[in-house]
Image (cartoon, rainbow, N blue to C red):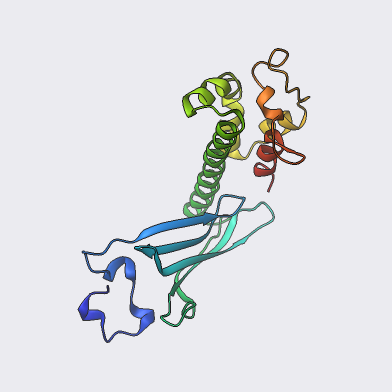
C-alpha cells in the first residue's frame, strides 16, 4: 500500500498520509474524550485496521494546552501494533507567545463545539428511539428549547460559559408535555436513573 520508493525506508520515516499509493483510500474512525479532544484515530482499509494515531495532551490548571504530542502506530501482521512513533509535538507558551495563546484558545473552542455537536446527535438518536419518531419530528419537538438556549450554547462554545449547564441543573423535570411543552423531553430516561438532562450536564462537565 506504500509507494515503492519507501520499501527500504525505516518504519519511523514513513508517513502513510503522504506515502500511501493513490489507488488506496483509508477510512478514519476518530474517538474523542469527554472534553472534546481527540484520543485515537483508527485508519482502516476494507474493514482491516492498518494504523492508528493517538494523542497525548498536557494542560495547565485552566485546561489550556501546554503540550500536544501525536503518535503513529502500524498494525502488525501477527496482531497488535508497532511501537509508537512520535510524529508531531508542540509546546505552548500562552503567557509570552501571542500566537500560542490564539492557538490554545481556538483549540478549546473547537473542542467545545465538538461537544455540542455530539450532544445534538446523541440526544436526537435517543429521542428517535424513545418516541419512535423521525429526525424531522424530533427537530420540531426540540426547536423551541434549542432556540431559547441558543445564546447559552454559543457562550459555552466561545468561552466555556457555564450558564447553560447551571440552568439545566436548576430545571424541575416534568415529563408531562401539557405542563412543560418545550422541555418535557429532558426528563426522558434512556438508561435507568439517567435522564437526557443528566446526559447533557455530564457532557458539559469536565
Q: Residue at horizontal 68%, vertical 40%?
A: 199
**Picture quadrant where residue 72 is located:** bottom left
Q: Is residue 140 left or right of residue 177?
A: left
Q: Which residue occupies the foreground of this view, 74 or 36?
A: 74
Q: Is residue 166 left or right of residue 10?
A: right
Q: Residue at horizontal 65%, vertical 36%?
A: 161
Q: Compared with residue 73, is residue 90 higher up or lower down, i.e. above or below?
A: above
**Picture quadrant where residue 56 is located:** bottom right
Q: Is residue 171 left or right of residue 181?
A: right
Q: Which residue occupies the foreground of this view, 192 or 49?
A: 192
Q: Which residue occupies the foreground of this view, 26 or 105?
A: 26
What percent of the width, then of the height, locates residue 141? 57, 21
Can residue 89 be spotted in the picture? no
What percent of the width, then of the height, locates residue 177? 68, 17
The N terminus: image quadrant: bottom left
What percent of the width, then of the height, locates residue 175? 73, 23
Residue found at the very far front of the displayed protein: 132
What percent of the width, then of the height, locates residue 37? 55, 54
Amino acid at each position: 500500500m506504500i509507494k515503492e520508493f519507501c520499501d527500504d525506508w525505516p518504519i519511523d520515516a514513513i508517513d502513510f498520509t503522504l506515502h500511501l499509493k493513490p489507488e488506496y483510500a483509508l477510512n478514519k474512525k476518530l474517538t474523542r474524550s469527554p472534553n472534546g479532544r481527540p484520543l485515537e484515530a483508527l485508519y482502516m482499509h476494507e474493514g482491516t485496521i492498518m494504523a492508528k494515531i493517538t494523542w497525548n495532551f498536557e494542560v495547565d490548571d485552566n485546561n489550556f494546552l501546554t503540550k500536544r504530542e501525536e503518535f503513529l502506530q502500524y498494525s502488525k501482521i501477527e496482531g497488535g501494533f508497532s511501537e509508537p512513533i512520535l510524529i508531531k509535538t508542540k509546546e505552548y507558551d500562552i503567557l509570552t507567545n501571542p500566537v500560542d495563546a490564539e492557538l490554545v484558545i481556538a483549540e478549546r473552542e473547537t473542542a467545545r463545539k465538538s461537544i455540542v455537536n455530539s450532544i445534538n446527535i446523541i440526544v436526537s438518536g435517543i429521542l428517535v428511539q424513545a418516541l419512535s419518531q423521525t429526525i424531522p419530528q424530533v427537530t420540531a419537538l426540540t426547536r423551541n428549547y434549542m432556540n431559547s438556549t441558543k445564546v447559552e450554547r454559543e457562550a459555552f462554545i466561545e468561552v466555556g460559559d457555564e450558564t447553560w449547564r447551571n440552568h439545566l441543573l436548576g430545571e424541575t423535570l416534568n415529563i408531562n408535555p401539557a405542563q412543560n411543552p418545550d422541555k418535557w423531553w429532558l426528563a426522558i430516561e434512556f438508561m435507568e436513573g439517567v435522564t437526557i438532562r443528566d446526559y447533557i450536564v455530564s457532557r458539559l462537565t469536565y
